[in-house]
Amino acid sequence: MAKRTRNRGTVRPDLENFDRYVERVYGEGVLLSGKAKAGKTTLCLHVLKNAIDLGREAFYLNIERRCKAELLHTIGGLDLSKLRFLQSTQEIKLTAEQWLQILERSIKDHPGAVIVVDSLAALSTAAEQEALTGESRDLAGVPKLLAAFFRKMSEVIDPLNVTLIFISQLMTNRQPRGPRYTEKGGLAVQYACSVWINVQWTSLWEADKDAQAPLGHDIHMQVKCSALGRPFIPCVVPLRFGRGIDVAKDVVTTGENLGLIERAGAWYTIPMLGDEKHQGINAVLEHLNHNPDRLRKVEDEIRKVVFGDGSQNVERADREAEAAGSKGETG
């Protein structure tokens, strides 16, 4: 009989659209790149929040030192006492070599951890830090270090069930051919990561009547490649300014697309919750945010439609494993 595979769980944001494409990221590497100021850091902080809720250790390597306390406090439910937040000090600026040593030690000493590296673009080698601005010619220093790091750690990350999330920025492509922009960090990180998510563009929400300005924007992403599922399908994540990822808005949008929430003009109805009507999306969002049990009920129904019955999936996987084992024994 074949050995039953271990279900290692999933760390993901509370987002239906995102969940459909990144289903299992434990023991894997994820590269998150693309447009600046779109919300990549906020998205990663939500992932760390969910990791902590699942009892996993969470690390945030703040290499850029741009993730401030104000941003951390916008992530509702994030237990800061359990988040290991690492960054350089004014007295000591860590080099790329030291950051990768810290990352290696964190992986080996904390199995099952979820680690965010923000960002690859901010890494600078010891030689680059010692040289005067403009003197350093070793532009390939960081990519070489990353290539060596992945050669050493590729067989360690998966068995230790560690998730690595690398945030990368765009840089102008100096080659005469190819894309206009390319991600920093070199090709090694692209090869090493099982999932590569690219933030392509953002779109502002409609202006709020009271604030007379948009309250957030949608992050339009695409899974460029994935060893865990189908790539090249767009994904939209709603981000509310000052609050982070707007779970309720994502649930309403996905529910409407699946036919679980009905819309007639500006009026919204959620049949599974009754015949009550809400005028405008802000009204239905306010209703769901003030009634978390109802929000969870709608979200659970969406998950059933998108993912199916989890128990049936497990039973089907067990039957397939047993069938494969019996074939091997008879062969």
Image: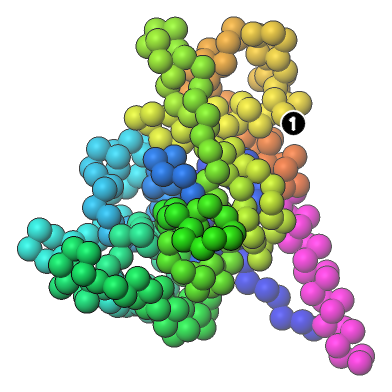
Residue at numbered disc 1: 258
Residue 138 visible at all? yes
Q: Residue at x 69, y 47 (%)?
A: 233
Whole-percent x and y of residue 11? 51, 55
Q: Which residues are magenta?
A: 309-331
Q: Quadrant of the C terminus?
A: bottom right
Q: Residue furthest left?
A: 91
* Rendered position, 110 above or below 82: below
Q: Give the prevailing secondary structure in the magenta stretch.
A: helix
Identify the image quadrant of the N terminus: bottom right
- x then y, percent, for residue 277: 64, 8
Q: In the rendered view, does 91 fall on the left or right side of 234? A: left
Asked whether residue 234 is drawn in magenta, I would say no
Residue 84 seen from this side: no
Pinpoint residue 69: horizontal percent, then vertical percent. 23, 42
Q: Is residue 318 magenta?
A: yes
Q: Nearer the viewer, residue 312 or 286?
A: 286
SS at badge 1:
helix
- Give residue 221's position: percent from left, percent from top: 57, 44
Would residue 193 be found to the left or right of residue 277 on screen?
A: left
Question: For the point 10% across and 58% down, which residue is it?
Answer: 90
On the image, which quarter does residue 84 sit in?
A: bottom left
**Label 1 neighbour load within 10 Å: few <14, some 14-19, many 20+:** few
**Circle 1: residue type:** Leu
Residue at x-position 40% and y-position 78%: 144
